[in-house]
Image (tube, coloured by chain):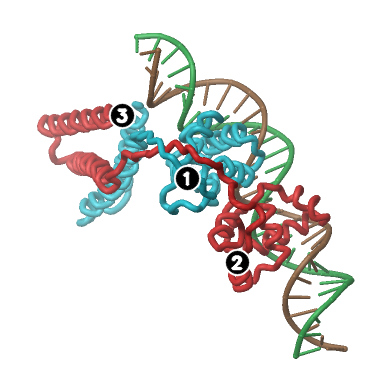
Chain colours: A cyan, B red, C green, D brown
Amino acid sequence: MKRHVLIFGLVGGLLIATLQYTEYRFVVIEHSVELYSALVAILFATFGIWLGLRITRRRETIVVRKVLVPASGPGAEPASAFAPNTAQQQSLGITARELEILTLIARGLSNREIATQLFVSENTVKTHCSRAFDKLGAARRTQAVQRGKELGLLP
Amino acid sequence: MKRHVLIFGLVGGLLIATLQYTEYRFVVIEHSVELYSALVAILFATFGIWLGLRITRRRETIVVRKVLVPASGPGAEPASAFAPNTAQQQSLGITARELEILTLIARGLSNREIATQLFVSENTVKTHCSRAFDKLGAARRTQAVQRGKELGLLP
DNA sequence: TGCAAAATCATCCAAAAGGATGACGACATC
DNA sequence: GATGTCGTCATCCTTTTGGATGATTTTGCA
């Protein structure tokens, strides 16, 4: 929790130190200060955005709604309204995060891409994968996707 | 969760106060660049966080969980009624064999399993895979499956 | 407040998958 | 008979995945 602030402080300090160093090295010329400011500003704005996104990640408001569905084959429903079969999900003990990663797998993303998109490490993604595969009884991601669709977990 | 932002803001404020204080205390001239940098950095980091939160407004994802009570589960459609989109297949130059292997991939089989099932070597399967992926513009088998379904090549 | 579940990250290792390239035979077509 | 496509197989090398395990942090809830 405090790690964020710590990292922030550390990066800030490092950056400033670097900047100082480079200033002492060369350009003490006219426009160095402005360039500085711009550089620092851009860097920290980016960092701030990243930090902001990271810190306030996923807040979910869960609305459980029961819906009676007339018999229909998969894909017969309006494409944008997919609701994962929570009964199956729960009975298999698949967590929300795991399901999230499963859907990204189904979209054809690699572990690395998933990691980037979710702001976590590749290792984490792999862990989730393994657990999900276990729970689905799958040995491969393609198999997991297939099972997931069978069970109504994936669109 | 909001504690992060609070702590961050607090630290930022303290830092600014400290900087101002120290600035008033001594060297206004010598270290003005560093102080300036730090201030700009902090300001823009804060701004970045604010901006990050603003542009990605909906940090709260409303998850509507529908509990399906279907009269029939997925797979209710006549299982054998799928006809691959031959137009797409031809326009992409995907051969029958390649499509065959794609469907097996979509079922979650490994290359080895596919090889066994089709009485060919694993190398052959890999070759077909590569060609098919090429034609589909996919880098992974999961992606190929996804594309295949999009294009109506796979059920 | 304290515990259990979930999420995160890491490391080591093995297997699978993917890319590039070359080759060979069967077949159809011009 | 030359040409082109398809299916088959191989080798070499890199990247990706998956498995097993342990540890730490966050979070939700009793």
Q: Given the image, on which type of amino acid does mark 3 rest?
A: Met
Q: Are marks 3 and 2 on the same chain?
A: yes
Q: Which mark is residue A50?
A: none
Circles 1 and 3: CB atoms closer than 8 Å: no
Q: Is residue B63 above or below residue A91?
A: below
The chain ID associated with circle 3 is: B
Dot 3 corresponds to which residue? B1
Q: Residues within 10 Å of mark 1 (few under 14, many from 20)?
A: few
Q: Is residue B116 above or below residue C27?
A: above
Q: Position of residue D14 (x, y in %)?
A: 65, 52
Q: Position of residue A38 (x, y in %)?
A: 24, 52
Label 2: element kind: loop
Q: Given the image, on which type of amino acid does mark 1 rest?
A: Pro
Q: Quadrant of residue B46?
A: top left
Dot 1 corresponds to which residue? A70
Q: Position of residue B88 (x, y in %)?
A: 59, 69
Q: Is residue B152 left or right of residue B128?
A: left
Q: Is residue A114 left or right of residue B116?
A: left
Q: Quadrant of the N terminus of chain A?
A: top left
Label whose residue precedes the other's in the sequence (3 or 2): 3
Q: Quadrant of residue C19?
A: bottom right
Q: Residues within 10 Å of mark 3 (few under 14, many from 20)?
A: few
Dot 2 corresponds to which residue? B85
Q: Is residue B18 visible?
A: yes
The chain ID associated with circle 1 is: A
Circles 3 and 2: CB atoms closer than 8 Å: no
From the viewer's side, name the closer residue of B8 and D9: D9
Label 1: element kind: loop
The outermost residue toward the left is: B24
